[in-house]
């Protein structure tokens, strides 16, 4: 204690979360995700996914997230982005303990982005006391009053329709998410490698959401519509000790195609890349490091860091050559584990919108 006053419950929870992720975060990879996973379940190939069960938590694994991003516009054509994320972190392996002894720590991030502003909120909770959690059926993910919840007619194979809401001090949003197309298993049947070694996650997405609702900034409500993307991922050790973070994109093409790709940055410069192209007829093309070329174009000074906020992306086998530019280059998530996350536009061989996330800078 530093003598500055009594610690609050939320301050205690936040401190516990920081301890759980590891104070050596950036020395050992973004948010300590390269630390040893001894005692936690391993990620292995050939897992059979089952829904709705896999929409719920997997506490035997160390880390997990439910991650929604949306590219939206209002009636005047003004562009917005929203982010809603629920993270689960196990601070110790073993069977679940009750109440405040529960090993699960929860963290929520919410953001709203416009060309001239980027608003961020963060909240923490301890598992076992009802403040946060996820139920698989009917699906409900929540932390405090933030939630992603199944509507009455939800299809477990689509995880739609759902409602989504969050609020910060100077923004809020409530959206409905609909999808007629099924989920996509990323990587090899949901087994997503993060290096040529054993680092991997279980990973699936719903890239086909149509979103509509109300976004409020500074007490001014705005009707918005657009496209949203859900990522579900869990692992026990997604980074290797020589990896510092990742650059990840989700892209909605005006043609109806979708593309997810990422680059795991390695200290020796031999970065590991992966991706999946999803055609309008739901056929997929898996992409590897030899297929993907990601070249930074513009570096922005944000929060004392140099962040590559514009990129050239090339995938020759798909005849893709695009340049991605941010809606707001200062889309910095100044949270306990800071990172850059924001909506982008792209043009070139293909056009559209999407989201860019960069960690570990």
Image: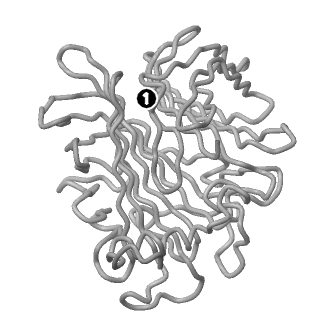
Q: Position of residue 136 (x, y in %)?
A: 35, 67
The residue drawn where x is 62% and y is 67% is 23
- Coloring basis for residues: one colour
Q: Is residue 83 above or below residue 26?
A: above
Q: Nearer the viewer, residue 158 or 145?
A: 145
The residue drawn where x is 39% and y is 91% is 98
Q: Is residue 150 left or right of residue 39?
A: left
Q: Taking the image as drawn, is residue 165 in sight?
A: no
Which residue extends farthest right? Answer: 268
Q: Quadrant of the C terminus?
A: top right
On the image, which quarter does residue 176 sit in?
Answer: top left
Q: Position of residue 283 (x, y in %)?
A: 55, 32
Q: Nearer the viewer, residue 215 or 50?
A: 215
Q: Nearer the viewer, residue 252 or 345?
A: 345
The residue drawn where x is 58% and y is 37% is 304
Residue at mark 1? 343
Q: Is residue 274 left or right of residue 270?
A: left
Q: Taking the image as drawn, is residue 136 in sight?
A: yes
Q: Nearer the viewer, residue 205 or 245?
A: 245
Q: Position of residue 69 (x, y in %)?
A: 40, 40
On the image, which quarter does residue 358 sit in?
Answer: top right
Mark 1 crowdedness (10 Å alpha carbons): few <14, some 14-19, many ≥20: many
Which residue extends farthest front? Answer: 3
The residue drawn where x is 42% and y is 22% is 327
Helix, strand or loop at disc 1? Answer: strand
Q: Is residue 32 above or below residue 203?
A: below
Q: Is residue 319 left or right of residue 84?
A: right
Which residue extends farthest top? Answer: 348
Q: Position of residue 214 (x, y in %)?
A: 16, 36
Report the label total.
1
Q: Is residue 70 above or below residue 199?
A: above
On the image, which quarter does residue 317 sit in?
Answer: top right
């Amino acid at each position: 204690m530093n003598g500055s006053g009594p610690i609050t419950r939320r301050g205690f929870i936040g401190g516990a979360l920081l301890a759980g992720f590891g104070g050596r975060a950036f020395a050992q990879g973004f948010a300590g995700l390269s630390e040893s996973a001894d005692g936690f379940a391993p990620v292995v190939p050939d897992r059979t996914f089952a829904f709705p069960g896999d929409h719920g938590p997997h506490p035997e694994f160390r880390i997990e997230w439910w991650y929604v991003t949306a590219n939206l516009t209002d009636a005047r054509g003004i562009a917005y982005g929203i982010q809603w994320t629920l993270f689960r972190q196990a601070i110790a392996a073993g069977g679940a303990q009750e109440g405040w002894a529960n090993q699960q720590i929860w963290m929520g991030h919410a953001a709203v982005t416009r060309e001239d502003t980027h608003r961020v909120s963060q909240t923490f909770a301890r598992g076992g006391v009802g403040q946060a959690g996820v139920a698989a059926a009917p699906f409900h993910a929540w932390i405090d009053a933030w939630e992603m919840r199944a509507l009455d007619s939800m299809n477990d194979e689509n995880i739609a329709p759902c409602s989504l809401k969050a609020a910060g001090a100077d923004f809020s949003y409530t959206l409905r998410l609909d999808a007629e197309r099924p989920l996509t298993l990323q990587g090899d049947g949901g087994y997503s490698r993060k290096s040529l070694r054993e680092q991997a996650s279980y990973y699936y997405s719903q890239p086909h959401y149509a979103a509509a609702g109300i976004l409020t900034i500074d007490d001014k409500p705005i009707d918005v519509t657009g496209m949203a993307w859900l990522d579900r991922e869990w692992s026990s050790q997604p980074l290797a000790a020589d990896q510092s973070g990742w650059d990840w994109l989700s892209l909605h093409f005006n043609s109806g195609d979708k593309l997810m790709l990422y680059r795991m940055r390695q200290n020796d410069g031999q970065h590991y890349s992966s991706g999946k192209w999803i055609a309008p007829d739901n056929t997929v093309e898996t992409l590897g490091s030899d297929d993907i070329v990601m070249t930074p174009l513009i570096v922005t000074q944000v929060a004392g860091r140099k962040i590559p906020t514009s990129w050239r992306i090339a995938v020759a086998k798909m005849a893709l050559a695009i340049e991605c530019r941010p809606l707001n280059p200062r889309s910095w998530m100044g949270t306990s584990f800071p990172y850059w996350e924001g909506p982008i536009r792209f043009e070139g061989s293909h056009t559209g919108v999407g989201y860019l996330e960069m960690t570990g800078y």
